[in-house]
Amino acid sequence: MITEIPTSDEFSSAAYAQFDFAWDIVISFMTILDEAGQYIELDKDDQAQFWEAARQRILTSLIIAQQGVELAIKGKLVAFSPYLLLGSPSEWPKDKTGNGIEFSEFKTIDAQDLIKAYNMVSPKPFDTKFVELFERVRKLRNSAMHSVNAKLRISPKEVILIILEAHEHLYPDKSWVMARKEFLFSAPATQVYFDHDHIDGVLVRESWAVFNLLSKSERERFFKVAAGVRKYICPACSYESQKLDGPVPHYAVLDPNTPGSTSLWCFVCNDTHLVSRENCSEETCKGNVISNDDGCCCTCGEQQ
Ligand SMILES: [Zn+2]
Ligand SMILES: [Zn+2]
């Protein structure tokens, strides 16, 4: 008998924990660099040296992200049958006590067979783009894990994109930002501090950093922020960011995007905010989108 059989949800939450950890590592370096940049002028060489010093840790974040991908696929397989994960019976451990063997004692099938197994049992196989991503990341992970290659470099943006892309394929019903928000609100620190007041600000700071890192088409794909449209300050996110002396987040869009539109949608707070279409009182500002929440211009941020 096999005991302690894991559920699909357990694999999912283990996968999410890995994605979040990998994301945390990369974001923490980006934040250090951003904050340092507020006090001292950093040229290209300084930044290159910074990332060189972080190289091994960024590689570690990639290894963790890949583990997350494997756990997520395992969770999807377990939804069909947990026994799909168990390799050949000739390799199964012996039940020496007669009380059964715990599932975790079994060797599970190799990473390279996970996709094969899923595509065999699922009515909807994985997208070929995901299969390519999985293979690419698996190879990178293997070279990072099993040898020391001074030439092996992964940029923070590559890790960010791997997480965003893998998450999009594996959990298409949930946006990464919302998943990340849930994670931040359930992080260990929130169990000991009663005050969670800063967490939305943390989410704004990292979302703004990633927003600036991505190309227009990547923003459109992962954050649903259309490429050619004007971006405005989100009043709610701006309020949260101010609590941490964070950046002014210019990432909300008019929804619908029409000249008379009176609502702004933001991908981070995932909310719409009512605005009035009046000219900003600042002489130099051409904005005409004023927040009904705080009376600030959503273009320049000035109070009206
Ligand atoms: Zn917002
Ligand atoms: Zn203005």
Image (cartoon, rainbow, N blue to C red):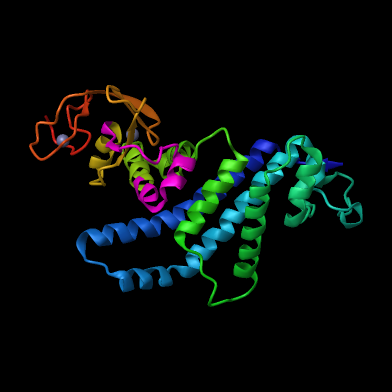
x, y percent for residue 77: 74, 41
Numbered-mark total: 0
Q: Is residue 154 left or right of residue 69?
A: left
Q: Where 156 falls versus 236 (above or below)?
A: below
Q: Nearer the viewer, residue 44 or 237?
A: 44
Asked whether residue 6 appears in the rendered view, the answer is no
Q: Residue at x 53, y 34 (%)?
A: 174
x, y percent for residue 127: 67, 44
Residue 304, quarter of picture: top left
Q: Which quadrant contains ligand 2?
A: top left
x, y percent for residue 249: 29, 42
Asked whether residue 56 appears in the rendered view, the answer is yes
Q: Where 290 falls versus 212 (above or below)?
A: above
Question: What's drawn in magenta, residue-wise?
Answer: 208-235
The verdict on residue 204 being magenta is no
Q: Where 52 falls versus 11 (above or below)?
A: below
Q: Residue at x 48, y 65 (%)?
A: 57
The verdict on residue 219 being magenta is yes
Q: Is residue 300 left or right of residue 125?
A: left
Q: Where 260 falls versus 207 (above or below)?
A: above
Q: Is residue 299 left or right of residue 44?
A: left
Image quadrant where one finds the N terminus? top right
Q: Nearer the viewer, residue 30 or 265?
A: 265
Q: Nearer the viewer, residue 17 or 129?
A: 129
